[in-house]
Image: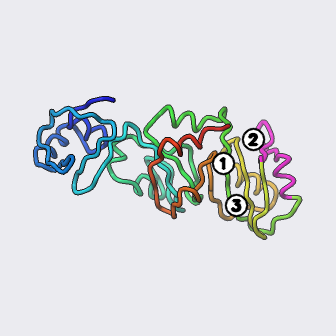
Amino acid sequence: MSKLTLDRILQSQGFGTRKYCRSLIDDGEVTINGAVVTDYKIALDTDGLVFTLFGEDWTYREHLYIALHKPANFECSRKPSQHRGVLSILPEQFSWRELQPVGRLDHDTTGLLLMSDDGAFNHAQSSSKRHIPKLYLASTQDPVTPALIAYLLAGVKLPDEPAPLLALVCRQTGERQLEIVLEQGKYHQVKRVLEALGNPCIALQRSAIGGLSLAALELDEGEWCYLEPAQLALLVPD
């Protein structure tokens, strides 16, 4: 358990500079346990701390771990160039906390996106050495054939890759739809291998990472949630 002064708590949660946070406290904008607190020097236990600011309750979190059901036409970048950034979907103060997307989804790819301000977590989740399986639902231009599935399971050699890209699991879920499980994390892997096999991907959704799925999170497109320890544990490979 750690203690921080109230101005440092607000600053750590992304509500602005310490000077600005002190002004919020001085103006009586912060409430704790139903009482307005105007002393920015007061030291508080941060474990489980809940404070109210601008009429909304916030729980102190040392780090943010976020799951977002990313919609289409959003970029996974803090500095988007052609489309809105995914950070624009989240509360504004999260940007102050250096929240970063964990890996990337193309602007037109939807589905489960992790975001955090914990650098060690981001690195671990992005590392190819961890072999974290990811489940994708791909819609194809032409009907799926047994041969297509066989090629995906056997591995597809692309000119710019040293080794074949292969699916751990691949099954047909519709006339023009596939579920594909990958763990290699290569750039545009699903789209590139389907293009190479002559049946381009026309829509793509990431449905799960490790044991964490969109279905279990019950997130509609554009919705997000905090990830708690039990959910984070699902991201650790067996």
Residue annotated with mark 1: 134
Please give left or right for residue 233 compared with residue 148 in the image: left
Mark before the other along the chain sequence, 3 or 2: 3
Image position of 90 with respect to 96: above or below: below
Residue 228 is covered by the magenta coloring: no
In this view, the residue in front, 159 or 219, is 219
The residue under label 2 is which amino acid type? Asp
Identify the mark at residue 160; answer none if there is no mark: 2
Q: Nearer the viewer, mark 3 or mark 2?
A: 3
Q: Position of residue 177 (x, y in %)?
A: 74, 65
The C terminus is located in which quarter?
top right
The residue under label 3 is which amino acid type? Ala
The N terminus is located in which quarter?
top left
Residue 153 is covered by the magenta coloring: yes
Mark before the other along the chain sequence, 1 or 2: 1
The residue depicted at 56 percent of the width and 40 percent of the height is 233
Label 3, label 2: how far apart the Cα atoms are: 22 Å
Residue annotated with mark 3: 138
Q: Position of residue 86 (x, y in %)?
A: 46, 54
Label 1, label 2: how far apart the Cα atoms are: 22 Å
Furthest-top residue in view? 2
